[in-house]
Image: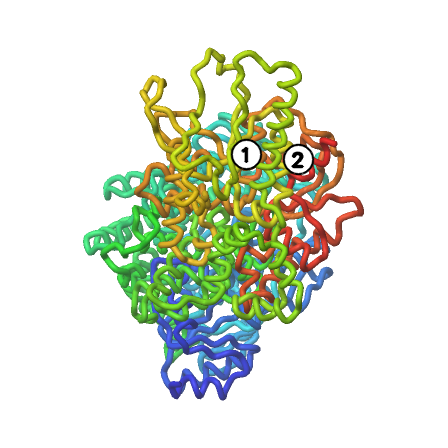
Amino acid sequence: MTDLEAELRRAVRGEVGFDVMARALTTMDASNYRRVPLGVVAPRDADDVAAVLAVCRERGVPVVARGGGTSIAGQATGTGVVLDFTRHMNRLLAVDPEAGTAVVQPGLVLDRLQEAAAPHGLRFGPDPSTHSRCTLGGMIGNNSCGSHSVAWGTTADSVRELDVVTARGERLRLGRGWAGAPAGLRALVEGELALLRTGYPELPRRISGYALDALLPEKGADVARSFCGSEGTLGVLTEAVVRLVEAPRARALAVLGYADESAAAEAAAGLLPYRPLTVEGMAADLVPAASAGLPRGGAWLFVEAGGGSPDEARARAEAIVRAADVLDSLVVTDPAGQRALWRIREDASGTATRTPDGTEAWPGWEDCAVPPARLGAYLRDFRGLLTSHGLRGTPYGHFGDGCIHVRIDFDLLTGAGVARFRRFSEELAELVVAHGGSLSGEHGDGQARAELLPRMYGPELVALFERAKAVWDPDDLLNPGMLVRPAPLDANLRFAVLPREPVDVAFGYPADGGDFSAAVRRCVGVAKCRTTSASGTSVMCPSFRATGAEEHSTRGRARLLHEMLAGEVITDGWRSTEVRDALDLCLSCKGCRSDCPVEVDMATYKAEFLHHHYAGRRRPAAHYSMGWLPLWLRWVTRTRTAGLVNALASVGPMAALAKRLGGIAPERELPRIAPETFSRWWRRRSVEEARRMMAEWRESGGPPGARQPHDTGDPDGPDAPDGATDNADDADDTDTDDLPPVVALWPDTFTEHFAPEVGMAALRVLEAAGLVVMQTPWTKWKAEAGQTPDGETWGYSANPLTSRGARVCCGLTYLSTGQLDRARTVLRRTLDLLDPFLDPRLGESVPAFVVLEPSCAAALRTDLPELLHDDPRAARLAASVVTFAEALERYAPDWNPPALDRPVTGQTHCHQHAVLGDAPDRRLREAAGLTGELTGGCCGLAGNFGFEKGHFEVSAACAEERLLPAVREAPEGTVVLADGFSCRTQLAQLAGVRARHLAQVLAEGLD
């Protein structure tokens, strides 16, 4: 423990972290920059803040205030002590509806303020796209704006009073009329009135530099306003009184389509007289191909209108449409439809980090602003500058305010690329100034732009900024290197520490060129994973919402992996205990794969890490007990000891011993193994049907030339003698166009051994829909000479000594525990078993494999081709995997399910949401009259996760977030749906509720 750490621990009541994990988590924000701090302090109150400043001042250690860590210019990183306000100083202290104000602490997330103000018909005006995780302190520090700034201005327009602690410990209450001004500030300003009146450009989004012009007498000498945008360099905010605005009772969203972004930009300023709430622009480059509902065009303006009623809001939106010269338009009044469209715009900050061809793109010139009337001309010049440097970027943003966001495909990994980054930055600064603009229109200057402020303001005004900083912070203690006396814009780049050669890994990472470092670089710090409550169908990131700890967010884990690769803070590489502990609470829900705008896949990264971490070492007991679950269950089936195992599991001491040895949480009940597997039941059913058919044929004499039914044998060991071959078919004249569709039902481990009733129900429904359902082969087929055009036919190899253990398996349990060598073996065996069905000569005739367990289907769709990226059969099998609902929709489109007419509740499986998609399920439920929406989030059990020792509390907290409340609040008679075995188990064990697979509900309806 260092002397500084010891002294801080004595001085403050909040947490002090100088350990590897605390430092590694705060090396970066959402910018291109990285600075390693000495430690992190989470103050509990203003006294703690003052104590930290006193200790650091005495030792000359810099202090950086940090909110949500979503700053894009580097101002939330530092080399000294980082103050984390999100842990304790995150409360809403008061809301005064009559005065229209709220009192907040700096760590309060904006959405929490909006939720508290909404019942009073109020809201906070500025709303950045990061509203679900950015903090009020960070917004004040950066003078944030958001999409509604054309109506309600910037954060500075919404600030009334600020409580601040200066670097020298003085506590000030900032306000108008010089209230709270530190000694010397008024004299400084009054001596430079002429410069302050002429040195600032007039535009709505001027965020760069210090707002010293707010101290002019004609502007009320507003010290609080002038403090906004100072990026933590003048004082440390501890409390704020902010203004709230009246929220419109109704809103309508007009989406205006234009030929290109220049046309949209030139039209934006002309819409301002209609007093819209937003005028946001984006081009087609940033719209996901799957997004639907936008009008025709190559670029769009999102123009929101408010009103006292829906009709009034729609009328105003339609007036805007009539005034706009558009290719096409759309007016949306439905709140859900508006949210879906806004989500496209808000996700652009992450989507823009990849160009359409997948190349990485980075911030750095993220938010320049020009007068709105000059936006079209500026964009044309900007595009020209990009082209001259051989760069690409897709502008989007606040067209009504002339503020443009853009991520550019800078090469920040090589010396030549960094040099081009600098040249481009210097030339773009000149271009912005030539158009009368501001280098920053929203996110602040930080390290990215502060070096170039003299080009915007001139040396005289920049020198005044330095003098103002000296008045507030004479020791240069607070966030040095930002705004004044800045570090070079090409120093401290976070990519410089990463390895230059690809890391040897198991997965293929096809979207990242096979480079694990590139996969980790995907996380740019947008921090959508840090939302404190799940909304809609979103999943990411359940462990963060349960714990509130940065290391349990997707961003936190990605940061730790980044530092692991860098090797400076985390020095033990794949053996790192810090990375292991952070990944331990990752549920592998894959929610980040879909909900993260840049599609970080932490479940895959976790499996990769565990694979290397435990290479050549003993693993946790749970990896053997639950990771090898398919193997243990097959032995139980072969020895026919399911009854014995269940009996022993029901005896308290025996169950406790088994759980202890297996690394299973003592709070958990062990699931009961089915006395008969699904495959054995299916075989028995097939034999009974065959016998019945034979009896009918004997009575009727049998159909002429009919082949006698053949017993296909026990799936755990075919009955045919060694070497016997059952040819696939005899040549005949059957018209194959009249044959019903054939699908194969996948015997996943959970359906096979724990819930065969799900498989039975699915089989019944699929057959009722007119499909021919075959069992997925369990033995290896081989080619023989035959009469087919290609000279061969297929049959199964039925040697019971060599094929008894052969089983198709998705490898899920091995994947989730990072046993990738074993997973590879299992998946290769699966491909070998299915080889004839994956022959490329079959073309589109490869059968569809219906997988009932969503997590198994997701593993086959994504993990299989990414792990066995060198085997073309993997991609073919992945492409042939369908869910239960997809099978019915694709192969029985004319089938009408039974009319059930009942409400449903439950949860969309997280893997279904993240990988498979649930649109076919929703359409199937609607066709069956199953009304109601399933919740988002995660059940918290997540396969082996919730069963592992030490995970029960987090597992239960995840379930309590959305799933359990939804089930408890459902009216009597509501059907509880849960397609995943884990989800059904969690509901049974925590709520005593029996949930069912959709196939079971439909099968019951067939009666």
**Side of 235 where 240 appears, left or right:** right
797, 592: nearer the viewer: 797
* Label 2: element kind: helix
- Residue 47 got which mark? none
Q: Residue at x 49, y 71 (%)?
A: 84
Query: Relative to 559, does residue 815 appear above or below in the rendering?
Result: above
**Side of 838 where 221 appears, left or right:** right
Foreground label between 1 and 2: 2
x and y, in percent, of residue 918 in the image = 57, 39
Q: Residue at x 51, y 58 (%)?
A: 587
- Residue 158 seen in the figure: yes
Q: Residue at x 52, y 40 (%)?
A: 714
- Residue 229 seen in the figure: no
- Residue 925 got which mark? 2
x and y, in percent, of residue 342 in the image = 55, 42
Query: Relative to 715, does residue 214 appear above or below in the rendering?
Result: below
Residue labelled with disc 1: 255
The residues bearing labels 1 and 2 have C-alpha atoms spaced at a distance of 31 Å
Q: Residue type at mark 1?
A: Val
